[in-house]
Image (cartoon, rainbow, N blue to C red):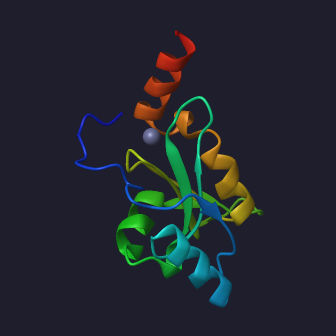
Amino acid sequence: MTKKKEADPFWAGATITTGAHLGKDGVKTAKTIGRSGAWTLKSRRRVGVRVGCIFIDKSDNREELQRKAGRVPSKSGMMVAASHAAVCDHHSVKGARSRKLAIAQTKKSDEWCALCDAELTKMASV
Ligand SMILES: [Zn+2]
């Protein structure tokens, strides 16, 4: 649970889009979105919160993202450094070891971000 108020939404000024995360196409996607290493950015339906995925190796905030994303279980169950980070507008970060798993995390940001959870609860009670 975080009480700290961040000045701006993480994805402020970014463009909602999806694309590749590696090579030239990945660079192009990140450029379109407006964040280094970013390869997908969507607005969560019903919540109105933007959640995107960043290929940590290609991010300018590599160290911070790596620290926040931490380690995740590999296919064989070993703990490895997360290669992708799902990030919501509230600056909450969830690590993932694959593109597919990162996308899955964007759809349930309410499970790893207290503020997304609060938004969802608010929307549900209207
Ligand atoms: Zn959030």
Viewer-proximal residue, 9 or 109?
Answer: 9
Please indicate whether residue 68 sits to the left or right of residue 19 in the image: left
The image quarter containing residue 16 is bottom right
**Numbered label tally:** 0
Viewer-proximal residue, 35 or 77?
Answer: 35
Kindly identify the residue that appears in the image at 47 percent across and 60 percent down: 70
The image quarter containing residue 47 is top right
Kindly identify the residue that appears in the image at 61 percent across and 48 percent down: 106
Answer above or below: position of 56 versus 3.
Answer: below
Residue 12 x/y as whole percent = 37, 55
Please indicate whether residue 2 sits to the left or right of residue 59 in the image: left
Q: Quick one: quadrant of the N terminus? A: top left
Answer above or below: position of 48 versus 25.
Answer: above
Q: Is residue 84 visible?
A: yes
Q: Quadrant of ligand 1?
A: top left
Residue 118 x/y as whole percent = 44, 24
Viewer-proximal residue, 82 or 79?
Answer: 82
Viewer-proximal residue, 33 or 101?
Answer: 33
Residue 105 x/y as whole percent = 63, 48
Please indicate whether residue 126 sits to the left or right of residue 108 in the image: left
Q: Is residue 82 visible?
A: no
The image quarter containing residue 108 is top right
Kindly identify the residue that appears in the image at 53 percent across and 24 percent down: 120
The residue positioned farthest toward the bottom in the image shown: 24
Answer above or below: position of 109 versus 75.
Answer: above
